[in-house]
Image (cartoon, grey):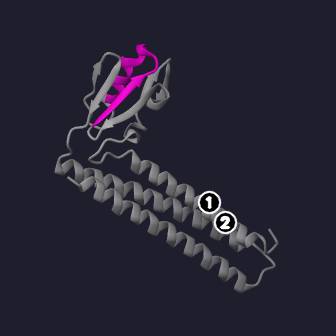
Amino acid sequence: MTTTESLPEIVKQARAAMDKAMENTRREFATIRSGKATTSLLDLVRVTAYGNEMPLNQVASIAAPEPRLLTVTPWDKSLTGAIDKALRESDLGLNPATQGGVIRVPLPPLTEERRRELVKVVHKLAEEGKVAVRHARQISKDQLKKVEHVSEDEHRRADHELQKVTDDHIKHIDELVKGKEAEIMEV
């Protein structure tokens, strides 16, 4: 790397990596149960089907017809038992009931203790997201140091821009945490 074009390019790559880390954190937050039913709650449930572990959404359709109920409709009726088993064994504390080829998954109200546990999980996931953002910053800082034939001012400007992008992403993750925490603690 020996051109001035590479400084903005490095910052751009860092921003893309940080966006990816933030999006991943947002997706993980969606799988954490709050007071209302969302289909993304079951995104991490894996079913043993056709000799493989598969995501639930690849073997069934999932719907949230009511605020406290999810329905899972297997595309292959022979997988109903495996889906039921996967739902029971997931760490979501669900108790599904099969009715004529449709698995109804009522969501019990969250206890205060369970809500606090979920908030801790949210904070842990947020910290992992922040670590990923900081990691992207560190990689980019290392790349910036290797760029030659540019003035110190340009280096400083690129470094400042990189720090600003990092701060924005971390601030956004903190906002996501506040929103998810409020959603979980809402009774």
- Residue 130: percent from the left, percent from the top? 47, 62
Q: List x then y, in percent, for residue 100.
A: 32, 15
Q: Residue at x 48, y 28 (%)?
A: 54
* Residue annotated with mark 2: 12
Residue 45 included in the magenta stretch of the image: no
- The residue most toward the left is 112
Left or right: 121 as drawn, with respect to 157: left
Kindly indicate whether the residue at mark 2 contacts the one at mark 1 (C-beta within 8 angstroms): yes
Q: Residue at x 38, y 33 (%)?
A: 63
Q: Amino acid at mark 1?
A: Ala
> Position of 99 compared to 56: left or right?
left
In this rendering, is residue 3 above or below 75?
below
Classify 10 Å Cα crowding around label 1: few (below 14), some (14-19), many (20 and above): few
Residue 108, relative to residue 170: is it above or below?
above
Of residues 181 and 137, the one drawn nearer to the viewer in this rendering: 181
Query: Image quadrant of residue 40?
Result: top left
